[in-house]
Image (cartoon, grey):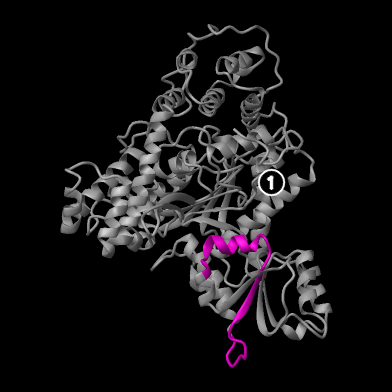
């Protein structure tokens, strides 16, 4: 399949998800294209570097790669056995080190492989191409030399990261300005964002958060404040090159791209998000998407550890991931009840429990009693176990009380008085949860942490000076003047009668579950962008032909000629997304219909919207992307430098002023 076959900027016909398109390009456009008729070599070796192997693993399984004729996957930087009768596929970044390694493999009288098909993950410069051409012994052995322009990590059907785990530190840290890492991080990030658009053959209106100094001329402009502007400009430059070099690349705008940074919403990464997906990653010590649990051994006398991936291929996960944890628990109970009702053998097995509630072990025993349903019960028992664990942690850590205060602070229903009362009366709340509560408070009332005030509050919460670093750096990220001196002392009675203020407006929502009020601010931004109401002074457009020094002129028009077809429909008339229609599964336990219809929902969509968050995205923001794709009838794709759960984000905040430490050194 060629790149143009895999997708186009017009959204008619059967449409594949973002991750499916990435997978198809790697398998068909790259691997399958190397199959040569009448070739003596059927199987091939696939050689990758540390970045491209991650790109591949996020989109493809080993079975997919093997099916395309790859029998061996190798690391470019490890010593490899010569296989002169086999062809090799190189999927590598276009760096001088990688090209030198490739030439060493294939030059001279005894090359490691018979023929080499070379695919670069991003644009290669002329100097490296010249370097390859200079070696006369290598040229006849090259079967292909091509730019794939695919250097991103597809973490979700609608999400990707650029794998910049230290972006907060390198772009917003105390010593970031003027450093080599600042420029290198921005450049690589821009390359990877641009390859997403190249893969999907999209040419966007590039919008970005304007520097605060462009809105207030009395403010000094800092490199930290210019990060979205600089990234937008760099992405724009790469897209201009794509327009000139990639066949059939759109010459007019086909979609929207909005670039922002983490400062637009500092609360989303730390507040407790109550959906199944977020709770799994926040509370269960998962390794990425890998969950480890104990299952009965084959003999049944002992247990053994089993690892499972909570990803899109699991239909129950796909159905429940964005559901409130209480809703997810109810749905799982319904599925189990329906399964027992519709299967006589299950009823017999259940009757021995005298009508009691089924435990995870009961479900596992049922698997043994009903082998023909083992796969379905395995999936169901896994999620029953996970939901049970989450609910236990919620009870043990008093998270309902913590979450209620968090949301009351955000929506202006609580302030300093309520926070102080909570800290005095809830001594058993964990240090981490107190820290997250204090960080939420600090983002709403940054002035309360000036001088001795913050120290007194942290002392009341029994938090350490290390924790104070995270609080101060979050204020620093948001633009608060942390160096401003306080003119007065602080007592715990100070200013508690001052009027409370909200940092979120209440939104009309169909959600009725407790603690489901909170929403990330990108929800508002995406809706305004889709409806053409995003302020042009705050979010200028790179495509605008008349930019001013600080951004765009007030009356500048942004080209949205192609962006309007999807806006005319009433929200109520839009079809409900597959993840919101889970309860009518045919057999009482299967969610396979979710998988069957997930791609068909993308038919006849409006133009895509891409939003990229510099400094880390959250699972609540990924949830919003899924929700708004259905609501706005436009496929929305979320990108970020990384996807962070609250513990990771807090660690990264601390590192903004602790550059000698590594990610592994800091614990929360």
In the image, 53 versus 92, the foreground residue is 53
Q: Residue furthest bottom?
A: 38
Q: Does residue 549 appear in this view?
A: no
Q: Is residue 498 left or right of residue 450?
A: left
Left/right placement of residue 416 relative to residue 183 reads left
Percent of width and height locating residue 411: 43, 25
Residue 183 is at least partly visible in this image: yes
- The percent position of residue 49, horizontal first and vertical second, equals 68, 64
Is 636 above or below relative to 663?
A: below
Rendered residue at 29%/47% (across/down): 332
User: Horizontally, is 158 left or right of 36 in the view?
Assistant: left
306 to 80, vertically: above or below: above
* Residue labelled with disc 1: 230
Which residue lies at the image location 48% right of the left edge and 39% below the top edge? 282
| Residue 167 occupies quadrant | top right
Residue at x 50% of width, y 71% of height: 63
Between 277 and 531, the one nearer to me in the picture:
277
Judging from the image, what secondary structure is the residue with disc 1 in? helix
Instruction: Point out the stretch of residues depicted in magenta.
Output: 36-62
> Which of these two is toward me, 120 or 308?
308
Q: Is residue 619 magenta?
A: no
x, y percentage for residue 13?
38, 68
Position of 603 relative to 492 (above/below): below
The answer to whether residue 196 is above or below residue 632 is below
- Is 53 in the magenta? yes
Q: Quadrant of the C terminus?
A: top right
Q: Position of residue 302 (x, y in %)?
A: 40, 52
The image quadrant of residue 140 is bottom right
How packed mark 1 is, by other alpha carbons closer than 10 Å (few <14, some 14-19, many 20 or more), is some
Instruction: Give left or right: position of 146 versus 599.
Output: right
How many callouts does the rendering have?
Answer: 1
């Amino acid at each position: 399949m060629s790149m143009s076959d895999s997708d186009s900027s017009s959204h008619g016909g059967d449409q594949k998800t973002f991750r499916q398109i990435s997978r198809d390009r790697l398998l068909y456009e790259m691997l399958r294209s190397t199959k040569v008729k009448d070739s003596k070599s059927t199987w091939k070796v696939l050689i990758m570097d540390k970045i491209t192997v991650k790109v591949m693993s996020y989109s493809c399984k080993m079975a997919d790669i093997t099916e395309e004729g790859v029998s061996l996957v190798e690391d470019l930087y490890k010593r490899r056995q010569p296989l002169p009768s086999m062809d090799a596929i190189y999927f590598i970044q276009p760096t001088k080190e990688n090209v030198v390694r490739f030439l060493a493999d294939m030059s001279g009288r005894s090359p490691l492989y018979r023929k080499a098909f070379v695919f670069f993950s991003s644009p290669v410069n002329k100097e490296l191409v010249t370097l390859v051409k200079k070696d006369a012994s290598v040229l006849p052995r090259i079967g292909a030399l091509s730019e794939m322009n695919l250097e991103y990590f597809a973490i979700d059907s609608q999400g990707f990261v650029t794998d910049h785990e230290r972006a907060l530190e390198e772009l917003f840290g105390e010593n970031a300005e003027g450093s080599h890492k600042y420029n290198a991080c921005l450049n690589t990030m821009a390359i990877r964002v641009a390859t997403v658009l190249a893969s999907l053959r999209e040419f966007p209106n590039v919008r970005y958060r304007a520097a605060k100094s462009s809105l207030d001329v009395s403010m000094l402009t800092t490199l930290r404040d210019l990060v979205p502007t600089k990234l937008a400009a760099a992405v724009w430059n790469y897209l201009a090159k794509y327009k000139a070099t990639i066949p059939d690349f759109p010459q007019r705008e086909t979609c929207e791209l909005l670039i922002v940074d983490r400062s637009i919403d500092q609360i989303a990464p730390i507040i407790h998000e109550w959906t199944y997906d977020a709770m799994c990653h926040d509370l269960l010590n998962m390794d990425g998407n890998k969950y480890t649990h104990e299952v009965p051994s084959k003999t049944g006398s002992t247990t053994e550890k089993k690892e499972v991936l909570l990803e899109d291929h699991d239909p129950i996960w796909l159905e429940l991931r964005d559901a409130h944890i209480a809703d997810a628990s109810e749905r799982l109970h319904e599925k189990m009840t329906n399964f027992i009702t519709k299967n006589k053998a299950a009823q017999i097995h259940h009757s021995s429990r005298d009508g009691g509630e089924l435990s995870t072990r009961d479900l596992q025993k049922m698997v043994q009693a009903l082998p023909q349903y083992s796969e379905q019960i395995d999936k169901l028992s896994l999620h029953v176990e996970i939901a049970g664990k989450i609910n236990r942690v919620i009870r043990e850590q008093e998270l309902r009380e913590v979450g209620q205060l968090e949301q009351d602070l955000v929506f202006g229903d609580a302030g300093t008085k309520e926070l102080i009362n909570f800290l005095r009366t809830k001594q058993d709340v964990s240090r981490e949860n107190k820290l997250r509560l204090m960080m939420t408070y600090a983002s709403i009332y940054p002035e309360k942490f000036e001088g001795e005030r913050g120290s007194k509050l942290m002392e009341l919460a029994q938090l350490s000076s290390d924790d104070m670093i995270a609080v101060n750096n979050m204020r620093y990220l948001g633009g608060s003047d942390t160096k401003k001196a306080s003119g007065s002392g602080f007592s715990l009675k100070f200013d508690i009668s001052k009027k409370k203020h909200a940092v979120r407006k209440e939104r009309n929502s169909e959600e009725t579950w407790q603690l489901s009020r909170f929403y990330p601010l990108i929800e508002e931004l995406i809706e305004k962008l889709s409806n053409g109401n995003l302020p042009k002074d705050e979010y200028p457009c790179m495509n605008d032909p008349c930019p001013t020094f600080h951004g765009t002129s007030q009356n500048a028009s942004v080209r949205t000629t192609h962006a309007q077809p999807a806006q005319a429909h009433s929200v109520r008339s839009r079809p409900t997304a597959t993840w919101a229609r889970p309860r009518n599964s045919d057999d009482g336990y299967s969610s396979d219909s979710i998988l069957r219809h997930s791609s068909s929902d993308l038919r006849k969509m409006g133009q895509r919207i891409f939003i990229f968050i510099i400094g880390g995205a959250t699972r609540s923001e990924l949830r919003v992307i899924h929700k708004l794709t259905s609501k706005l009838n436009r496929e929305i794709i979320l990108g970020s430098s990384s996807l962070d759960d609250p513990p990771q984000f807090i660690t990264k905040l601390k590192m903004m002023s602790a550059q000698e430490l590594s990610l592994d050194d800091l614990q929360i």
